Image (cartoon, rainbow, N blue to C red):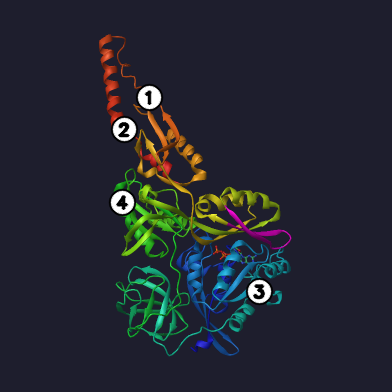
Amino acid sequence: IDVKRIRNFSIVAHVDHGKSTLADRLLELTGVIKPGNENAQVLDQLQAKRERGITVKAVTASLNYTYNNEPYLLNLIDTPGHVDFSNEVVRSVTACQGVILLVDANEGVQAQTVAVHSLAKRNNLVIIPTLNKVDLPRADPAKVKAQLKSVFHIEPDTVLKVSAKKGWGVKELLEAIITRIPPPNIQSNDYFRAHIIDTWHDKYRGVLCLAYIHSGTLKLGQPVKWKSDMKQHTVKFLALLRPNEENITEAVAGQVVMVGLGPKGGGSVGDSLLSPEATNCKDTASVPAVRHMVYAGIFPADQSQHTQLSDSIKKLALNDSAVSVSVDSSPALGQGWRVGFLGLLHLDVFTQRLLQEYKAEAILTAPSVPYKVKIKGAKVIKHYKTDEVIVTNPLQLPDVNNIVEYYEPFVIGTIITPVEYLGAVNTLCIDRRGSPLPSSAVDEQMTMLQYILPLSEVVMDFHDTLKSITSGFASFDYQDYGFHASPLVRMDILLNGVLVDELTSIVHTSRLEYNARKLTARLKEMIPRQMVQVAIQAVVGGKVFARETLKAYRKDVTAKLYGGDVTRRKKLLKQQADGKKKMRSVANIKIPRNTFIDVLKR
Ligand code: GTP
């Protein structure tokens, strides 16, 4: 196929604005699936099935379409549709020259519409603004066109109208894809190079990669090497995804194809495949590396299930290149893993799959964000000398006396809300330590607010709270704003003066009193009474911020002696007192594992 007749595009939209439904219609019109199956959601089913109704993984479909008697190859690169997955959205668009910006004609511009629009702009992509759901009686295309004009300066006469459900306007949309989006810009006489947009794991064939070919040609059986380690392999599998695999023997620059190098061939997102003669590697579009925003510990409910859970986590991680897994261990919970996620929803999807697909039981600790600290002197980490350390688990904090500065991750949050909730939303953002950026009107009813917010405050329950204070009418999305210095401290929990490792946390000074009180009170409620009195303290830098006392329960050792001999009673009471002393001296407080699970779980 002539590269002039290739179009690579994505559909980007706020969640539920109809991306999957539109993809189905495009697949139908190009003859991939039979019409009639009203909401088949083919792309979703194909890979991620439907996890809570949200598209998780980016998949692709190469579609044939004839326009003006010329054959075209349209590559629809599907993108996941949720705030957590914006990293994957970014990866998908690096192979595109244009996007369909889909907006629900009934709901109008939402927070995620703003985020995906700015992403498309940053990548210099052609934007085809498209209103969906125009069949709905309450659809108001004129109003949403005006919103597009005021928020994005999009001219109303360039906006298309479709109903993905009914199939209205989809043919016109296909033609707009051909006429408005340029063909891929490639250097045809250069050596072969391609970058990896996505990977997944196949039981028999090993890692399969979705690759965008920047230049040259790729043939089945040809030698290639990875940019990362320069190791050479042979192309064992080559296919177009239509979206079902269609084996091919050759692919050219501008195409998006599935490549497999066999069980030992490897492949990871962001890496590049090069022809063996390629020497310099200035090349390939930079694919942003995955950034983990949320971490949680995963432990087997019972250590006997460790191997089974380990297998399950490994399998899931192979098919989700966005998670990071490292071994973790906790004195109370045993051997487990620390897993990094793109966001809370990603964490939910991962653990639900863990439970559903592998029937593995697991304990999940409360999610936390990564912190950064600057330390005195430099340290060598992975061959680099650095004075900055990323801490994904509070337990790994360097000695506080060595810490010069703490940093926490911030995000720019975009909120679109009806004006009547402005007061409540502003209060929520300020309460969550947010600093406001200029706001702007979407139209008379809706306002767009932007805040710089600490990620730790967002991952808690920000989205749920926002939804509940605005009766579900506000939408929210966030973009990474990097690490910034912040007055954080390390808070420890002591039981009778002894540090309980797994209860250490990193806390903002403004939250210190509150967190200290809450946690000690909670522990007092949950730790069963002991033979000894237990002091529960929340301590920062040697100073006690909250204290609770769990009274000893006096086991009535004399109960069995009905009246009886006084000396015998005294002897038993003395034994009991000695026992208390002994226990106190080793601070041997018996805390059931369940208490830890309850406190650490989310
Ligand atoms: P995610 O995959 O979660 O990002 O959602 P999505 O954007 O792919 O939305 P999806 O296609 O799942 O559609 C969301 C809902 O809107 C579904 O109930 C669809 O049936 C409905 N829907 C999609 N397009 C139309 C349309 O043109 N008209 C009407 N009336 N409903 C539509």
Q: Which mark is residue 72?
A: none
Amino acid at the residue labelled 3: Trp
The nearer-to-camera label among 3 and 4 is 4
Q: Do the residues labelled 3 and 4 touch (CB within 8 Å)?
A: no
In the displayed structure, does residue 99 sit left or right of residue 561? right
Which range is magenta?
434-451
Separation of marks 3 and 1 at Cα, in angstroms? 74 Å
The nearer-to-camera label among 4 and 1 is 1
Instruction: Inspect this view and state whether residue 537 appears.
Output: yes
* Sequence-wise first label, 4 or 1: 4
The residue carrying mark 1 is 553
The residue carrying mark 4 is 306
Q: Are marks 1 and 2 in contact (CB under 8 Å)?
A: no
Separation of marks 4 and 1 at Cα, in angstroms? 36 Å
- Looking at the picture, tell me which residue is in the foreground, 441 or 473: 441
Amino acid at the residue labelled 1: Tyr
The residue carrying mark 2 is 587
Amino acid at the residue labelled 4: His
Query: Residue 2: where, in percent of width, then height?
Result: 50, 89
**Among the 4 quarters of the image, the one containing residue 27:** bottom right
